[in-house]
Amino acid sequence: MKNLTFWRATLLFGLIAVLLLALLPTGDQMVFSGQDKLLHGITFAVLFLLSRQSLPAGASLWLIYPGLIGYGILMEVLQGLTGYRYMEGMDLLADLLGLMVGHLVVLSIRKAQRKLQVSRL
């Protein structure tokens, strides 16, 4: 049985840390083109996985999307207000793709677990 309090605290810490990092000034130290979008995707895939662990058993994975998309929108708006960061629509697309990747990971794990259970019978 998973510990919901632990996962919820971890998710909250992750959300706060990501928001703080998103609002810090950045230099132009891009290693490759598209690095920012890749980081958005990875971040939101991880946030999806943490969110999944934070839900009670049997809750729909689709509950995660509105909250994290809203979080992504808030982050972009706040970045636009800083004067040194920019609000970018493509970041939101990268966030959504990251959520979808996280969702696919969860579904793949579930499928593998079902196969293991069947093979043990």
Image: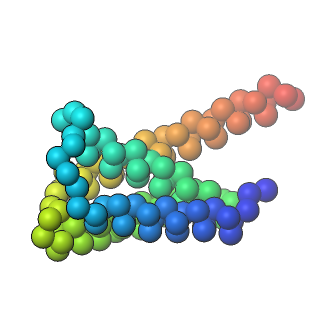
| Residue 45 seen in render | yes
Q: Is residue 113 above or below residue 66?
A: above
Residue projecting furthest to the left: 83
Position of the N terminus by quadrant: bottom right
Q: Which residue occupies the foreground of this view, 73 or 40?
A: 40
Name which residue lies at 66% across and 59% down.
58
Total numbered circles: 0
The colour scheme is rainbow
Name which residue lies at 55% across and 56% down.
50
Q: Position of residue 61 (x, y in %)?
A: 53, 56
Q: Which residue occupies the foreground of this view, 41 or 84?
A: 84
Q: Position of residue 120 (x, y in %)?
A: 85, 28
Q: Position of residue 3 (x, y in %)?
A: 73, 62
Left or right: 42 as drawn, with respect to 103: left
Q: Is residue 70 above or below residue 97?
A: below
Q: Which residue occupies the foreground of this view, 80 or 116?
A: 80
Residue projecting furthest to the right: 121
Examine the image and state in which quarter residue 2 appears: bottom right
| Residue 60 seen in render | no
Q: Is residue 96 above or below residue 81?
A: above
Left or right: 31 as drawn, with respect to 86: right
Residue projecting furthest to the top: 119
Name which residue lies at 47% across and 55% down.
47
Examine the image and state in which quarter residue 87 appears: bottom left
Name which residue lies at 18% across and 72% down.
82
Position of the C terminus by quadrant: top right
Q: Position of residue 103 (x, y in %)?
A: 48, 46
Q: Is residue 95 above or below residue 64?
A: above
Left or right: 101 as drawn, with respect to 39: right
